[in-house]
Image (cartoon, coloured by chain):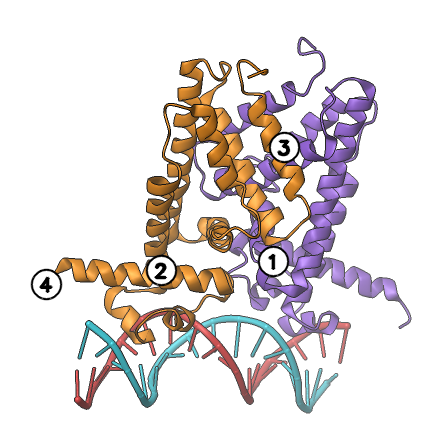
Chain colours: A orange, B purple, C cyan, D red
Amino acid sequence: MASPDMDADARESVAVAVQRALAEHGYERLTTAKIAEEYENSEAGLYYYFDSKDEMIAAFLEHAARYLSEDLLRVDTGDPERALRDACEFLFRTPEHEYAGIAVGIMELLSHAPYNETLREPLLDLETACLDALTDIVAEGVEQGVFREVDPRATAAFLLAAADGSTGIAVALEMDVVDDLQRGWTAYVDGLLADPSG
Amino acid sequence: MASPDMDADARESVAVAVQRALAEHGYERLTTAKIAEEYENSEAGLYYYFDSKDEMIAAFLEHAARYLSEDLLRVDTGDPERALRDACEFLFRTPEHEYAGIAVGIMELLSHAPYNETLREPLLDLETACLDALTDIVAEGVEQGVFREVDPRATAAFLLAAADGSTGIAVALEMDVVDDLQRGWTAYVDGLLADPSG
DNA sequence: GTCTATAGCTAGATAGAC
DNA sequence: GTCTATCTAGCTATAGAC
């Protein structure tokens, strides 16, 4: 293996192909043929780097986890309130959101986790990354006295659950609740403030 | 058609068969053969009452919507706080809950809604039934002065999203966040009270 | 490393006997 | 109405040429 990086690059481009195919067709209709359509090479070529379809999906999940934790949930420790509102703006996705299709795909995979050993761990890693990032933001806010003395982990878990659920009802189902949800989480974050007049 | 009720009964028992098979295998691995395993008759027999597998699933969703709105989210107008806590106890299911497997199945179907025309409407009806029931409870509480002057629909939408999302986080992944979620929604409901000492 | 071709399987749905 | 048998399509994964 002269260049392990070439393999890593190839696996990365398969992960992106899975992402595109998943956003377009959904997990239940995701086939290796559809992944290959979004890939530069043929369907058989996928199996040079992966032993199974599930491993290709796992590679996508690891890719998504990196994207989420590295780029989108970085804590601005200087301003926990701003950081939490920014995180909510991102996590409570609207159907127009660039990332919306991917979020629905992840949700579909998540709901299939009980029946799929291969995907369970990468999914756990992804959700844990989000939960930890939110917990850090809330904990920092409590420490600085910006937020009330709430339980950071309970607060983060409740917010993450609400965000995940909003993907299902507002994005996947296109239920007319986008404005209601926005008022809902805004009021929730307002209620966390130590000084409500703030 | 001498007896339309017989047809209704047969369709109902298919709905129950779908429910059992869905809880056991998940949507992605749900087959008509597995539905038939939970059904009193053969696989071909399913097609006497339904034209397709999707229609069988739709029948299950209508069955679940009736169950939810008729039996489990009835408003006790005398005690909105109690009604809301009871609804939350049910909606934020723990993995041990009898209904947990069904909730995961519904979540899986929900996330596939963008790609499945047949299932979208029954899913919308189901979620709407939950949202309306929660909205009624909150509105009643505000009217009685038990809750603060919150926006009933925004509050209900936020709670429903959190409950839906908790299914994925807690049940599907079996993450160690069930207790965190419980504290999260309890604190949220506490925060709705007009008289926190209540 | 990447391809075409295809093996091997399983799914949803139907035919036709009873 | 319900059955057994089966058709057809589409899937994952592999074989073997290049």
- In this rendering, the label closer to the viewer, 1 or 2: 2
Residue type at tag 1? Ala
Specify the label residue A184 is tagged with.
3
Looking at the rendered structure, the secondary structure element under dot 1 is helix
Marks 3/1: CA–CA distance = 24 Å
The residue shown at (37%, 29%) is: A76
- The residue pinned by badge 1 equals B113
Q: Considering only order in the chain, which callout, 3 or 2, is on the residue closer to the N terminus? A: 2
| Direction front: furthest residue | A198
Which mark, by number, is residue A16? 2
Q: Residues within 10 Å of mark 2 (few under 14, many from 20)?
A: many
Q: Position of residue A110 (x, y in %)?
A: 47, 49
Eye-nearest disc, 3 or 1: 3
At which x and y percent is residue A74?
36, 34
Q: What's the amino acid at mark 4?
A: Met
Amino acid carrying label 2: it is Val
Which chain contains the residue that carries disc 1? Answer: B
Amino acid, disc 3: Gly
Distance, label 4 to label 1, CA atoms, is 44 Å
Residue that badge 4 annotates: A1
Identify the residue at image location x=58%, y=48%: A168
Q: Earlier in the sequence, mark 2 or mark 4?
A: 4
Q: CA distance from mark 2 to mark 3?
A: 34 Å
Nearer the N terminus, badge 3 or badge 4?
Answer: 4
